[in-house]
Image (cartoon, rainbow, N blue to C red):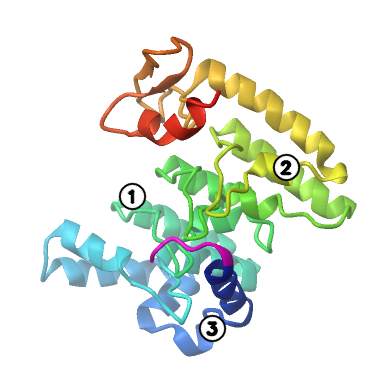
Amino acid sequence: TEPLSGAESQTLRTFFTSNYMDPNKDLDSYGWMLFTGDLAGVKADFERRKANVPHNVAVNQIFALRWGSTQTPVFNCLLLSTLIQPGGRQKVLDVARWLIAIGVPVDGKDLSGTTAFAHSISTKPAFDIEYAKILLDAGADINHRNRYGSTCAHEFCMVWTPLPDAVARAKTALGFFLSNGGDPNIADNDGITVMRLLRAPWMSGLKEAAEIAERKRKQNGCWFCGSIPSDRHAVELLRCSRCKKARYCSPPKGCQRSDWPNHKQG
């Protein structure tokens, strides 16, 4: 679970290209209930758990579940199901909503440190705005960084060829990312930011959109995590005592401390 960069980062990326959670091989009976959208079975399982342990312990037991060599957690498993068997999508989404309602956190991470939210808008292959919104409303961190130090935007902005469909999907994903407080200036463990990825000639339109959104974010929200006071983000923003312009989430969040290496150079 340690952060990776350079050759170590590439080794894990290569591992993920040839290893995956195989439902037929890796899922146990509970995993199959998730995968098939068996809400009645999932509810019955939870009641059996609560017969032996308190509610919060039963919730944590579900949150801790992982499957396969890539250590796929609950909400990642549900997303994978919607890709493999789209006909059962609504049943799977009902299971996701119910698990959220009982308090199962949505920020479980696989072996790469990637969450279901990040996978849901990665565009490689998933691009599921509906599921992303469900997870975001349940508390998913849009600026979460995986073991490579990457946000979800690093993944969908890695467009190496100017294919219209690929660029269009990246543009839509970037728009969603930016409009929900995503920060394109977060660097991964190799020092690469999303803004740098957008320098490719065929990404110029996306770069302009990111720059506009970044100016708006700095006017209205936290300069580090992008949170804007709203019904979903009950945060208080405090101004930097030095520049009097930058605003950050108040403690205990450490946004100002985390942004200091970048802010002091501005």
Residue 22, disc: 3
Q: Residue 81, how many percent across, how many down? A: 55, 70
Task: Identify residue for label 1.
Answer: 101
Q: Can residue 92 be seen in this view?
A: yes
The amino acid beneath tag 3 is Asp
Q: Nearer the viewer, mark 1 or mark 2?
A: 2
Query: Which amino acid does the dot numbered 2 rest on?
Result: Thr
- Residue indicated by mark 2: 172
Q: Is residue 85 visible?
A: no
Q: In which quarter of the image is residue 172?
A: top right
* Label tally: 3
Q: Is mark 3 on a helix, strand or loop?
A: loop
Q: Quadrant of residue 41?
A: bottom left
Disc 3 from disc 2: Cα separation: 30 Å
Residue 198 place in picture, x, y as percent? 75, 42
Image quadrant where one finds the N terminus: bottom left
Q: Give the range drawn in magenta.
A: 1-6
Residue 77 rendering spot, x and y as whole percentages: 48, 69
- Does the stretch in magenta take in 5? yes
Q: Which residue lies at the image location 54% right of the left edge and 54% below the top edge?
A: 118
Q: Does the magenta stretch include residue 15?
A: no
Mark 1 in CB contact with mark 3 (< 8 angstroms): no
Q: Distance between the residues labelled 1 and 3?
A: 28 Å
Quadrant of residue 201 within the rendered picture:
top right
Query: Between residues 96 and 156, which one lies in front from this camera angle?
Result: 156
> Residue at position x 33%, y 71% from top?
65
Disc 1 residue type (three-letter): Ala
Cα separation between marks 1 and 2: 29 Å
Residue that protrudes farthest toward the bottom in the picture? 25
